C-alpha cells in the first residue's frame, strides 16, 4: 500500500501592508458653545447732593425778611433829623406813627445803636452761613448808619440858634431824614420783592466788604 501523504495547507498569510487604498474619513465635532454666566457687577448707588451755595444773590423768604428789617436800623438811628420836616407834613406823621413804639424801644438805651451795629456786622455780615443777599443788604444798612456821623458832627460843631445858620441846619437835617426815609422804603420794598437794592453812595462800599 502506498501511503498517501496528506499535506495540510495553512491559511494564507495576511500581508502586513495592504496595497489597497482605503478612504479615511474624519468627523470634526463642533465644540459645544460655552455658556458664560453674567457677572453680577456691584451696582453703586450714587447719591447726588446739591448744596445750595451761600455765596449767591438769590433770596428766599427768610432772606428777604431779614434784609428788609435791616434797613430800619439806620432810619431809627437817624429819626432825630426829621424833627423839623415831620411837624410840617401830615402824611409823614401818618407814615411814622406805626413805627413810634419800635423807635422808642430803640432809643430807650443810649448804646442800643452801637450794640445793633456790632451784632449786624459780626453776626450777619461776617457770617458765611448767611447768603450774600442778606450780607450785602445788611452792609448797606450799616454804611447808611455810619454816614450819619457827618451831619451829627456838623450839628455839634455848628449849632446856630437863629438866622440863616438855623435855616441851613434845618435844611440839612430835613435832607438827611428824607434820604433815610427813601432808602428805607426803597431798600425794604425791594427786599420783599426779592430784588437787589443798590443805594447811591453806599452800594460800592458794601460790595467791597462782602466777599
Image: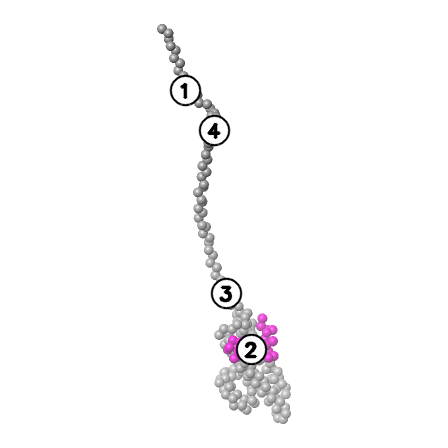
Distance, label 1 to label 3, CA atoms, is: 101 Å
* Mark 3 crowdedness (10 Å alpha carbons): few <14, some 14-19, many ≥20: few
Q: Residue at x 40, y 16 (%)?
A: 9
Could you say where residue 151 lies in the image, as x and y percent from the top left?
61, 84
Q: Is residue 98 left or right of residue 81?
A: left
Tag in front: 3 or 4: 4
* Magenta stretch holds residue 81: no
Q: Report the magenta residues as a range.
A: 188-211
Q: Is residue 90 left or right of residue 9?
A: right
Res 143 visible:
no
For the residues labelled 2 and 1, say whether their Cβ atoms are less than 8 Å apart.
no
Q: Residue furthest top?
A: 1
Could you say where residue 182 lies in the image, as x and y percent from the top left?
55, 83
N-terminal of the pair, mark 3 or mark 4, is 4
User: Dot 2 corresponds to which residue?
Assistant: 197
Q: Residue furthest bottom?
A: 163
Question: Which label belongs to residue 50?
Answer: 3
Q: Quadrant of residue 210?
A: bottom right
Q: Secondary structure at mark 3?
A: loop
Could you say where residue 93 lies in the image, as x and y percent from the top left?
51, 88
Distance, label 2 to label 3, CA atoms, is: 28 Å
User: Dot 4 corresponds to which residue?
Assistant: 21
Q: Residue at x 60, y 88 (%)?
A: 171
User: Dot 1 corresponds to which residue?
Assistant: 11
Q: Secondary structure at mark 2?
A: loop
Could you say where residue 108 lies in the image, as x and y percent from the top left?
52, 83
Amino acid at each position: 500500500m502506498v501511503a498517501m501523504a496528506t499535506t495540510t495547507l495553512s491559511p494564507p498569510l495576511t500581508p502586513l501592508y495592504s496595497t489597497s487604498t482605503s478612504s479615511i474619513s474624519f468627523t470634526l465635532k463642533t465644540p459645544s458653545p460655552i455658556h458664560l454666566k453674567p457677572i453680577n457687577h456691584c451696582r453703586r448707588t450714587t447719591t447726588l447732593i446739591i448744596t445750595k451755595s451761600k455765596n449767591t444773590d438769590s433770596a428766599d423768604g427768610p432772606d428777604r425778611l431779614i434784609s428788609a428789617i435791616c434797613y430800619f436800623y439806620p432810619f431809627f438811628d437817624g429819626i432825630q433829623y426829621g424833627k423839623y420836616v415831620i411837624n410840617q407834613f401830615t402824611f409823614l406823621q401818618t407814615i411814622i406813627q406805626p413805627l413810634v413804639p419800635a423807635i422808642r424801644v430803640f432809643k430807650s438805651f443810649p448804646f442800643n445803636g452801637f450794640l445793633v451795629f456790632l451784632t449786624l456786622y459780626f453776626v450777619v455780615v461776617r457770617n458765611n452761613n448767611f447768603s450774600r443777599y442778606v450780607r450785602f443788604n445788611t452792609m448797606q444798612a450799616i454804611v447808611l448808619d455810619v454816614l450819619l456821623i457827618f451831619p451829627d458832627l456838623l450839628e455839634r460843631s455848628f449849632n446856630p440858634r437863629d438866622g440863616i445858620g438855623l435855616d441851613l441846619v434845618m435844611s440839612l437835617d430835613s435832607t438827611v431824614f428824607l434820604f433815610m426815609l427813601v432808602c428805607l422804603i426803597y431798600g425794604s420794598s425791594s427786599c420783599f420783592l426779592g430784588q437787589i437794592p443798590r443805594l447811591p453812595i453806599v452800594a460800592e462800599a458794601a460790595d467791597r466788604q462782602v466777599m
